[in-house]
Amino acid sequence: MTSLPLIIEPDELEQHLADDKLLLVDLSKHSQYLQAHIPGAVFLDYAYVTAISKPTMGLLPDAERFGHILSTLGMTEDTHVVAYDEEGGGKAARLIWTLHAMGHFKTSLLNGGIISWFKEEHPLVADVTHSAQTNYAVSYTHMDVVADTDYILQNLQNSDVALLDARSEGEYDGSKKFAERAGRIPGAIRFEWTDGMDEARHYRLLPDAELKSKLDALGLTADREIIVYCQTHHRSALSYVMLKHLGYERVRGYPGSWSEWGNRADTPVEI
């Protein structure tokens, strides 16, 4: 199969639906999947893509358990995964980031997800797709796409490292509280995940030049390492994929995000 881009358009994806190395994964709500999905897509519940250790949410899933889940979807080392959802790409991007942490980089995000696919009248079906069982083992071998709390603490004063906060303005300025403490990681720059979306173009990412201009103006430049976070590294997973698409070489996601940072007593908070 010809190599597919990290961000794939509906027209290009439709041309590849019959490729035997393609695994199309739908992370929409199950009711949405049963009503209508892209032909050949398998359903994956987003709950399987993350793990919980209360109060911390959004952790990397257990490798053995996640390997079993991917095996039921028909995953192999040669599989190219195209992920999509119904919300603009957060859930689908989180799957892609997780696969990258495993060293599986044959991945694409459908630009605009099921919204752009439906609005532009590409085919939809309601029949449930069942893939052949495989034996796919998961291990997290590429932790250079992951940032933990200690790594962030060590780099708070490092001018080569920038923090992208993908949360809402209220979460960022501390007026909305979803953890023991409110606020942001010191020095973090807010670029809300929806700031990169173009609602008029069916929730695709904004054009590359426009995204680069916005990010450069904030100091989130491609020469720096960028650590992205939100509340549970759900929204910020789209930020990760966006930056990788734009050619940023050093991008990390913070799995626990604010649900970890804001619930610890030993982490500095800025408001």
Image: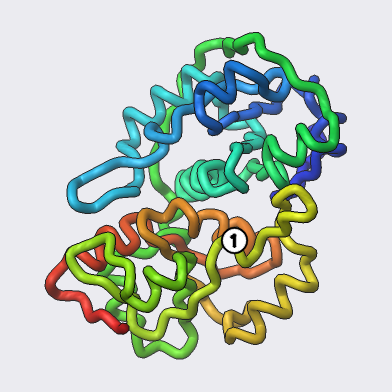
Residue drawn at x 65%, y 86% is 217
Q: Is residue 266 left or right of residue 64?
A: left
Mark 1 lies on a secondary structure that is helix
Rendered position, 23 above or below 4: above
Which image quarter holds the N terminus? top right
Residue 199 location, quadrant: bottom right
Which image quarter holds the C terminus? bottom left
Whether residue 271 is visible here, answered yes or no, is yes
Rendered position, 55 above or below 270: above
| Kind of residue at badge 1 | Thr
Residue 25 location, quadrant: top right
Question: Which residue does the numbered mark 1 point to in the structure image?
Answer: 194
Q: Is residue 25 left or right of residue 214?
A: left
Residue drawn at x 77%, y 42% is 4
Residue drawn at x 86%, y 37% is 11
Q: Which of 157 and 126 is in front in this view?
A: 126
Looking at this view, name the residue that lies furthest to the front. Answer: 175
Q: In this view, does 224 lie to the left or right of 262?
A: right
Rendered position, 133 above or below 166: above
Q: Nearer the viewer, residue 134 or 153?
A: 153
Residue 266: x and y in percent read 14, 75
Residue 110: x and y in percent read 70, 42
Rendered position, 124 above or below 98: above
Whether residue 228 is visible here, answered yes or no, is no
Residue 107: x and y in percent read 64, 42
Residue drawn at x 23%, y 62% is 179
